Amino acid sequence: MFVRFLGGLLLLLALAWAVAYIAGTAVLRNAREKPWPYGLGSIDEMNVRHQIGDSSKEAYELLDLAIPIDPGDAAGNYLGLQIAKRDDAVDPLPADVAAFRDDERVARFERLLLDRGERIRFGGDRFHPNLQRVSDVLAALALDRARAGNTAAAWEHLRAVSILARALREGRCWGGRRMALLLVRQVNAVARKLPPPAPPWVAGIAAVEPRPDIAATLQEEAAGSIAVLAFPGLEPLRDFKEASALNRPRKVAEAMASAPRCHSSGEDADVYRAARIEEELEATAKVMALKAERARLGRWPAAPADGGASRCADAHWEYRAAPDGSHVALWISAELAPEPGAANAPALKFAY
């Protein structure tokens, strides 16, 4: 009797396991085949994209130049301090960054970007962090050249960083689009502090849409963080966990795609960052337009030409100019993108 009971119990457990196995397989397959917003396709299609094509010869040359250069975090830390300032004030370069002013390797890195940037194509390799570190040096040098009055050289340093950002956005390397967005944010913030006139290529930075890049980053990270359970018999649990790891960020991306411009649910740091970058891109465009007017008039204009209109939903820009046009303040009228875990995001406000 006991043997028959035990046999029945084992049969029941085997049946339950088989049902769970079939259900888990179906759920995981659906999660992998479900399309993501912004035309990114499914997880399976993304994996195929990242396997197609090697990096171009120019991309490998750029890597060969960048890898031996080790500026550490000094340039990035310096940039962070300068970008946080609400006006055009720029501190002198720290000694460990100033050492790269005449570095031949950095000069060759920049020249490759400026001369053959359209040929740089990143394939399925992973992004190398030294590309960011050297671009930090170029952006820091841009501020340094502007501080010394060499505006043309400042804009050229920054153009080289923008070319790298474009190559990473258009490439297939893992982590490339996240890094491209960080570089776009950096170029945009440094451009705000440079003297007019802004070169024509700067308009392309203002036109960047950060949400597709954030969604692509979420998709990459979802594919790379799925659960791995190697114990035999736990396949159904593994499949359900992997499906959950794929579905959660996809739903975040879908919510981001349907949200008004510059707005964020505040539940995901990347979504907040996309909304914040939308505000920052517009802010820089506003500041540069005002600077151009100041250069033309010899004083700050009494009011912005667009009246403070904003592409951000339910927002506009406030502008206050001194009666004699000697100084101004510009700020966005509403807190649109609350930071996760915080009641409000810091206001975007500039004073000149």
Image (cartoon, rainbow, N blue to C red):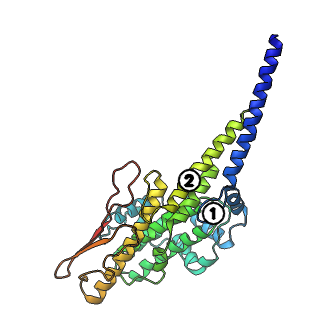
Image coordinates for residue 303, horizontal then vertical, percent:
26, 81
What residue did someone put label 1 on? 40
Q: Secondary structure at mark 1?
A: loop
Nearest the camera: 126 or 177? 177
- Give residue 18's position: percent from left, percent from top: 77, 34
From where the camera sits, is residue 227 visible? Answer: no
Residue type highlighted by circle 1 = Leu
> Front-most of 203 and 266?
266
Reply above or below: 246 against 63. Answer: above
As drawn, is 27 to the left or to the right of 155?
A: right
Q: Is residue 203 visible?
A: yes
* Residue 251: mark in rendering: 2
Q: Residues within 10 Å of mark 1 (few under 14, many from 20)?
A: some
Crowd class of label 2 (few under 14; some 14 to 19; many from 20; radius 10 Å) = few
Amino acid tagged 2:
Lys
Name the quarter where the N terminus is drawn.
top right
Kindly state the secondary structure of the residue where label 2 is placed: helix
Q: Residue at x 45, y 50 (%)?
A: 267
Image quadrant assignment for residue 7: top right
Residue 203 is marked as none
Closer to the camera: disc 2 or disc 1? 2
Percent position of residue 206, x then y: 45, 75
**Quadrant placement of the C terminus:** bottom left
Q: Earlier in the sequence, mark 2 or mark 1?
A: 1
